[in-house]
Amino acid sequence: MSVSRRLRPAVLAVLLAVLASACSTLPTGRPVDAGLADRAEQLYRDGQLDESANLFLNLAEQSRADAAAHYRLRAAEVLRDAGRLDAAAQAIADVRRRRLGGDEPLRLDLLDAEIALSRGDAAHALDLLNRTDGIEASEALQLRVYELRARAQTVAGDRFAAARTRAAIDARLSGADRDHNRSEIIDTLSALEPDALIARAETLQPDDALLPWIEQALRRRGSMLPRQLPQANRPVGTLQADDSGALHAEGYRPLRQVALLLPVSGPLGGVAQSIRDGFFTAYFADASEQRPSIRVYDSGDTPAAAVAAYQKAVADGADHVVGPLQRESVGELFRQPLPARVLALNHPDSGEVPPPGNAEFGLLPDAEGAQAAQRMIERGIVSAAVIAAKTDWAERAALAFRTQFEAAGGRIVGESRLLDNEVNYRNAITQATAQLAPAPDGGVFISMRPQQARLLVPQLQIAGVTAPVFGTSHIYSGDPNSGFDRDLNQVEFCDAPWLSSPVPGRPDRGNISNQIASANGVGARLFAFGMDAYALLPYLGWMLQHSDQYIDGATGQLTADSFGRIHRRLGWMRFENGIARPAQGVLSSVPAAPVMQ
């Protein structure tokens, strides 16, 4: 008989490790044919579970005292592995704990707990599992305790406790076991209503390990948590004197060899070009004695290719890796051992956080929507209409706006979506703004490409909507175009500060755009993104431990949270006479040079 498919993958891997160590010694008692015991173990390894269990039971019948108890426990474990828990319960019915040695009493309790779970008796299972607290055991048995406890907590109806139990062992698992455990965490939390998840999240500390899992579960349910907007108050790199009196920049760690993983060709080749040009522009603007060696690797267009590129970079001696770019590739790389620190240039499609010591950095529409909501609340706007393009990124921005705005006490009075082939937005405007309060209490949030925004804003005015309009960076093409953008006058939007004003420590955009084509148009943000990726590297380890410190970046004020996610506090611009200019309240700059402390 083959190994039962009813067995969970994580449990199976743990059990195999337990059983492999369990048979290394035989108990004391009347001698038995050691060859038969070895034969039973071989049958088990070959997947002939019924035959293995029967042979163990025969050995138990031929043995006395401790040996009989040992063989009955082994028979029960094999039967359980075959999915025959009732037969396993019968096999250990007469086993006495005092007859067992080593880790066998713990294994007996775990088997009893699983049998209790199969019968719906979560309370008895938890009692048995709680009895294991404080007992020294192998890593495999400890993981099995957590696995069974999580299952018992789920059966008992405490899904938050079950998810937390599984989250506690996430870093101790790898491969298929880790993937299975993570899937169980999301499934466990996703069974709860979004309101319950949000309410629980509000009780947790910002660095609670359960928060990222709640975020993923909410995303699956089409909801999200309000974002904790960056509140850093200290720039990195403050000059400090060491014991010898020499000055050094706080948090700075010199780099030796950096690998840049980007899709050199294919559909994302143009995107990669802008990022790469920005990265090298920042590199050559750095002091020559501080520059590491840099090699570019083609990460291809598949997760497997990205992982192979990372492994090649590490083999070549890289101590820091920047990339990959595609969401799927980032997720796959985060599931691998990472001997060289990674700064991924996107957030994984699975929503998981980076492994400890690594980070992810991206230009997220979610962040823009949330900061637009905060901007409007700060202006005293308490009712908002939402009009967005019917695209994935615009939907994400709109959802983040709604979540943040309502969490801050605002009210969404209407929403509508614009299709690509539409030019008359009268119905969409009426649907979204019919109940909108006039200024100063009301406002309109938009997220769409420039072509749609240039059509929408004049139609809002024709419809008599006088409330101020706020948007995401998508409404700006990236280059001044007063002829086209005059229709967007007075619209405010969040964007990378580098597009509209000088940023200390970064090359001036006016000079760069005349020399490098990829720093223009929609590529300008990606160019700024590449510059910031380079600027983050020497401070990355420090920032992951100090969430109160920031880098004044080209894409915004950059901070890191305890989960390894880089956050951007964006700048604000307003169209005036068709030109995007810094708006009142835009981020203030910090000095280019570190200050003495």
Image (cartoon, helix red, strand yellow):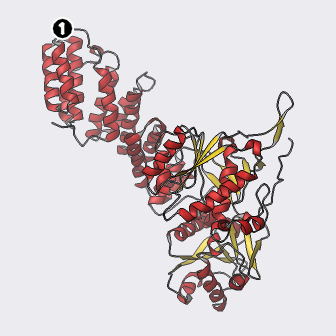
Count residues near mark 1 (Cα–Cα under 10 Å), then give few for <14, some for 14-19, many for 20+: few
Quarter of the figure that contains the C terminus? top right
Give the amino acid type for the residue marked by disc 1 in the picture.
Pro
Is 579 located above or below residue 500 in the figure?
Answer: below
Is 333 located above or below residue 266 in the figure?
Answer: above
Q: Is residue 297 left or right of residue 541?
A: left
Q: Secondary structure at mark 1?
A: loop
Q: Is residue 42 visible?
A: yes
Please provide percent x and percent y for residue 207.
60, 45
Please provide percent x and percent y for residue 137.
41, 23
Is 496 located above or below residue 110 in the figure?
Answer: below
Q: Quadrant of residue 112?
A: top left
Please provide percent x and percent y for residue 487.
69, 85
Q: Is residue 66 left or right of residue 345?
A: left
Residue at x 46% of width, y 35% of height: 172
Q: Quadrant of residue 555?
A: bottom right
Q: Quadrant of residue 539?
A: top right
Q: Is residue 131 left or right of residue 26?
A: right
Provide the residue designation for mark 1: 31
Residue at x 73% of width, y 40% of height: 251
Please provide percent x and percent y for residue 208.
57, 44
Q: Residue furthest bottom?
A: 462
Q: Is residue 231 visible?
A: no
Q: How many marks?
A: 1
Q: For this rendering, which residue is in front, 530 or 150?
A: 530
Quarter of the figure that contains the N terminus? top left
Is 545 located above or below residue 399 in the figure?
Answer: above
Q: Is residue 500 left or right of residue 155?
A: right
